Every structure is written in structure tokens, then in C-alpha cells.
Amino acid sequence: MMKKITIFGKGNMGSAIGKRFEDANNTVSYIDSKTIADNLGDIVVLAIPYNAVTSVLETYKNELNNIIIIDITNPVDFNTMDNLLVPLDSSAAEKIAKIAVNSKVVKAFNTNFAATLENKTVTSKETTVVMLASDSIDAKNEVTEALEGSGLDVIDAGTLKRARELEALGFLQITLAVREQINWTGGFAVLK
């Protein structure tokens, strides 16, 4: 069933994610920092920096009720490239879930680089796999269905608590790319 997707942010990640949802016959709209939306989709994607998330959640508090929120953030301290901005016993996704208590939060896309979403492959060899973590099985199923036909594979990584490991993996992958140990078209692949 076609979904209406709203993506906050139209940078490399937001655009690449939007294209994959469009490939799967969903309707996609974008909101940037200069746009105020009055009607959000069935699924909202936070393709914005971690430090901008709280403002969006506060601005759209009522509109986000009973909506699936996909958190793609990697809460990396980009000043030092040496720490995450959340405690080890938590995650950005869990913090979002505590603020947006009436929403279904799904961690996804944070272990994928934009190029691997654009190309639908990691280093032109392996199919790009999106890992989903959420306490809502229904939300994970809806996101999986919304990506059918996108050219991406989707895997259930477990409960929202697994966002901790996904964010650590995303952090490691980013630091490897920044240090030019891997290419931005590469990264970690999941072989099923």
C-alpha cells in the first residue's frame, strides 16, 4: 500500500532516501529549515543533524502523534570525531522516543552512506541493506512494506535498544570514511 512520506531535510541523505521511497511508489515531500508543513505523511524521516532534532520534535509535537518517525541520525561529536553525543547506555533514537511518546520511532538508514542508497549497492558489489530497530513491530513492517520495490534490502535489527549498536556502527563507518580508510561508496555490507 502506498504511503505518504515526509522527509525533514533534503541533503544527500534525505534526497537518496526520498528517491528509494519514490521507487517503491510512495509519495514523498520534503521540509527544509525555511518550510513549515501543516500536513505530515504516514512516515516522517528525520534526515537532519542530531542537534536539530529536538527543535523539529517540539515544533511538530501535535502533528507527530501516531506517526512513524524514522531517525537516521548519527549523534557524532563532529568537533572531535571522537565521541557520541549520547551516553553509552542510550541512543539518539531512544531519546527521540522519550520526547515523541505518542509516535512509533524506528532507527534506520544511519548505517548507510548516501552513495550506497543512491547506487543501491555497497562498493557496487553487495545490495544495500537497511537495518531497522524499533519497539513497534507494526512500524518496522510498515517501513519494510514502504521500501518494497526500492532496490534495497531491509532487515529487522531488533528492538529500539539495538539503535545503540547501530549508532556505534554508523559512528565507526563515518570515522573510517573521514580518515579515508574506506570510500563513501563503501561501508559495511550485510550479507544474508
Image (cartoon, helix red, strand yellow):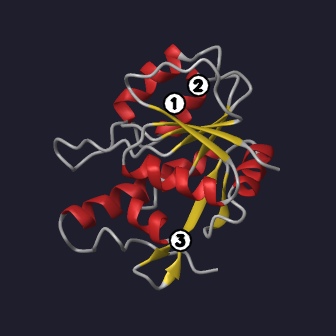
Q: CA distance from mark 3 to mark 2?
A: 30 Å
* Distance (Cα) linking label 3 and label 1: 27 Å
Residue 116 locus on image (x, y percent): 44, 68
Amino acid type shown at disc 2: Lys
- Residue that numbered label 3 is attached to: 128
What residue is at 62 percent from the left and 53 percent from the top?
A: 21
Where residue 62 sits: x, y (%)?
65, 14
Q: Amino acid at mark 1?
A: Lys
Near-viewer residue (142 or 15): 15
Which secondary structure, mark 2? helix
Instruction: Give the residue at mark 1.
Output: 95
Please determine whether, in this image, residue 142 is positioned above or below residue 91.
below
Which corner quadrant holds the C terminus?
Answer: bottom right
Label 1 neighbour load within 10 Å: few <14, some 14-19, many 20+:
few
Neighbour class for label 2 at 10 Å: few (<14), some, many (≥20)? few
The answer to whether 82 appears left or right of 36 in the picture is left
Residue 177 vertical placement versus 53 (above, below): below
Q: Position of residue 30 (x, y in %)?
A: 51, 36
Q: Say which residue label 2 marks.
A: 98
Can see residue 171?
A: yes
